[in-house]
Image (cartoon, grey):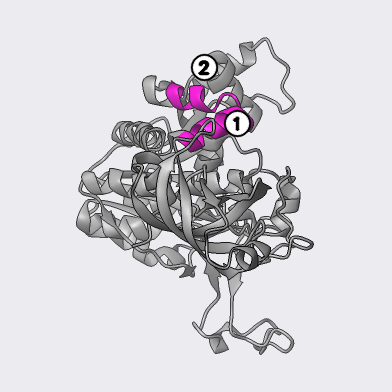
Amino acid sequence: MTRRIAELLRAGQPDETVTIQGWVRTKREQKGFSFIEVNDGSSMAGLQVVINQDVSDYEASLKRISTGASVEVSGVLVPSPGKGQRIELKADSVKVYGEADPETYPLQKKRHSFEFLREIGHLRSRTNTLGAVFRVRNACATAIHQFFQERGFLWVHTPVITASDCEGAGEMFAVTSLNLKQPPLNDQKEIDYSQDFFGKPAYLTVSGQLEAEIMAMAFSNVYTFGPTFRAENSNTSRHLAEFWMVEPEMAFCDLDGDMDLAEAFLKYIFSYVMEHCPEDMEFFNKLIDQSVLSTAENIINNQFERITYTKAIELLEKADKKFEYPVEWGLDLQSEHERYLAEDLFKKPTIVTDYPAEIKAFYMRLSDDGKTVRAMDILAPKIGEIIGGSQREERLDVLERRIVQQGLDPATYWWYLDLRRYGTVPHAGFGLGFERLVQFMTGMANIRDVIPFPRTPQNVEF
């Protein structure tokens, strides 16, 4: 049976007969022996394979083996005399599945820029850095499910196609089956959506939150984990047009319970990744960002600071620092403000609560002062906001008024309002951009390098 290289590096013993499969990272020849490093993606390190002339078809096999070739090797594990490796594989047989022309294979043994690697997205996962990123990404996803499942949450699959704009921002991708060259028009010379597939305008979802609230009204505690979309023409290192969101929703929960869960959630994920991907995290700390490990320890070991938005504004106004964007009550915090609070002032994750109602979404619960809403953002050192959440507005009359104030049509949200008519309860939830979490955790500078196939303006390759 084929064995994974990570398992062999961890627990393989001399004299074991094993078979491995993977891709050749390096090849060198020395005094009648050939040494190849084979990696199967299960770990940062590959397994060194020693091939001597006793192997059948030695010359023919050797000619076909080069960096990038796929191979299967069977043999016996032996102690390795080389530094930094405990065992190596003495080959008895070598099978080449697929060759890689060394003249044209783009991933030779040298450093490549991340910009170049994005151009070869079909091959970049074979590099050390992207391999480590996607192992950490996998561990994060596993931890997310484990965290919620251990607490009795139901994982719900919310729709990708929707007629509702959760954020009210209007930055949505349209979904249509109409002929865009000659769309049908109504009497007002506007597009006649009654002839479209769904009979009305439809879009790719920007959030599964509203549907999660529906499910929370039956199952109490639920969470979503799936793709979301923003048609935002932004070419920054922190924005994607397609990204994954984690959104728990809890019935019979207020803002304090929401903050408690969010803090426990982040601590759990970081602890899980540190335990299950130590080699990859050490790699990031050494070669990408030397604060990766200390950042993780900061998250895991510190109680998060909690302040109101009003207090945050006061602290920013007193700051001995010049900000690019203005600081004023009623304006949203910018990334530089968020980072100052978490990174410079408190030096640990900081939760800011009770934002002005005018700058927050219609579904957030209006506070008794009539000016703020029961919202919260978790700000993290080096990245700023990483989680945004709120207690939801459970009062029908207040919710209807908020929808109208934000220029939305209450009729579109009839079902959402029904949740307040029939058995309404206090409830709360939050959203976490999955790629921003992975970016924050690994120290990667560009969010396009923490998702296998980034979707950004003018880029939909692979």
Question: Horizontally, is 331 left or right of 246 in the view?
Answer: right
Q: Is residue 290 visible?
A: yes
Q: Which mark is residue 333?
A: 1
Q: Which residue is mark 2?
A: 347
Q: Nearer the viewer, residue 293 or 70?
A: 70
Task: Quarter of the image for the N terminus: give it.
Answer: bottom left
Task: Quarter of the image for the C terminus: give it.
Answer: bottom right
Q: Which mark is residue 77?
A: none
Q: Is residue 372 visible?
A: no
Among numbered discs 2 and 1, the one appearing first in the sequence:
1
Q: Secondary structure at mark 2?
A: loop
Q: Nearer the viewer, residue 76 or 41?
A: 76
**Image point 40% across, 47% down: which residue?**
77
> Can you give x and y, in whole percent of width and height, for residue 130 in the image?
59, 48
At label 1, the amino acid type is Leu
Magenta segment? 279-298
**Image point 60% across, 69% down: which residue?**
98
